[in-house]
Image: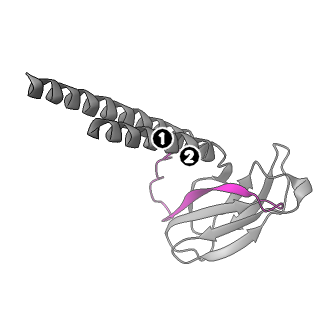
């Protein structure tokens, strides 16, 4: 009975993870470059927003900012973009979340404002979301493996108790 409950819980966790993975794949907001210095310009792009639906709004939040930036261009590669000048920004990591003109979420990402002459930070998960998908798949496989091991241990314990 207890093994069944554990398996049901594990399967529920796996199903929830499978439902969340497509959301990570839809996060099509990028910042280029992902690491910049104070006073530089970064390009915010929401690749899954249609220009025909209206301007995208990029919500910027971080150590000293909580502001919206409206898209200004529609690049040939698709989506909507805006340039952001980082003069006066505090060093740290900022989150950019896009909302398309039709009010659908355009995804989110982060970028870092580093000191002038500072080392470039690592790319992390990247702007394409591959790292997020790999992490999610790893968690799913780990949960499934743990459920199998737990079920086998319970079955062996039950067999040993009947002998």
53, 154: nearer the viewer: 154
**Which element carries disc 1, helix, strand or loop?**
helix
Is residue 67 shown to the viewer in this render?
yes
For disc 2, the marked residue is 20
Could you tell me which quadrant the C terminus lies in?
A: top left
Horizontally, residue 53 falls left or right of residue 115, namely: right
Any magenta on residue 48? no
Residue 3 image point, x, y percent: 29, 36
Task: Give the mark, 1 or 2, whose residue is nearer the N terminus.
Answer: 2
Is residue 85 shown to the viewer in this render?
no
Residues rendered magenta in the picture: 100-126
Q: Residue at x 10, y 28 (%)?
A: 161
Residue 69 image point, x, y percent: 74, 70
59 in relation to 128, above or below? below
Task: Report the coloring of the rendering.
Answer: one colour
Does the CB distance between marks 1 and 2 fall below 8 Å? yes
- CA–CA distance between discs 1 and 2? 8 Å
Q: Residue at x 61, y 76 (%)?
A: 66
For disc 1, the marked residue is 136
Q: Residue at x 34, y 36 (%)?
A: 4
Q: Of discs 1 and 2, which sits in the foreground?
A: 2
* Tally of numbered tags: 2
Residue 14 image point, x, y percent: 46, 39
């Amino acid at each position: 009975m207890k093994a069944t409950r554990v398996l049901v819980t594990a399967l529920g966790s796996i199903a929830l993870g499978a439902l969340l993975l497509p959301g990570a794949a839809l996060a099509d907001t990028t910042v280029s470059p992902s690491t910049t210095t104070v006073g530089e310009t970064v390009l915010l792009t929401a690749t899954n927003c249609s220009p025909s639906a209206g301007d995208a709004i990029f919500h910027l939040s971080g150590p000293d900012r909580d502001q919206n930036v409206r898209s200004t261009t529609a690049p040939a590669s698709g989506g909507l973009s805006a340039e952001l000048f980082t003069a006066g920004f505090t060093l740290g990591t900022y989150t950019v979340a896009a909302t398309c003109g039709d009010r659908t979420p355009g995804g989110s990402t982060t970028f870092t404002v580093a000191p002038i002459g500072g080392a470039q930070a690592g790319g992390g998960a990247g702007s394409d979301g591959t790292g997020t998908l790999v992490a999610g798949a790893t968690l799913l496989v780990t949960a499934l493996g743990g459920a199998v091991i737990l079920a086998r241990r319970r079955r062996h314990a039950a067999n040993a108790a009947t002998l």
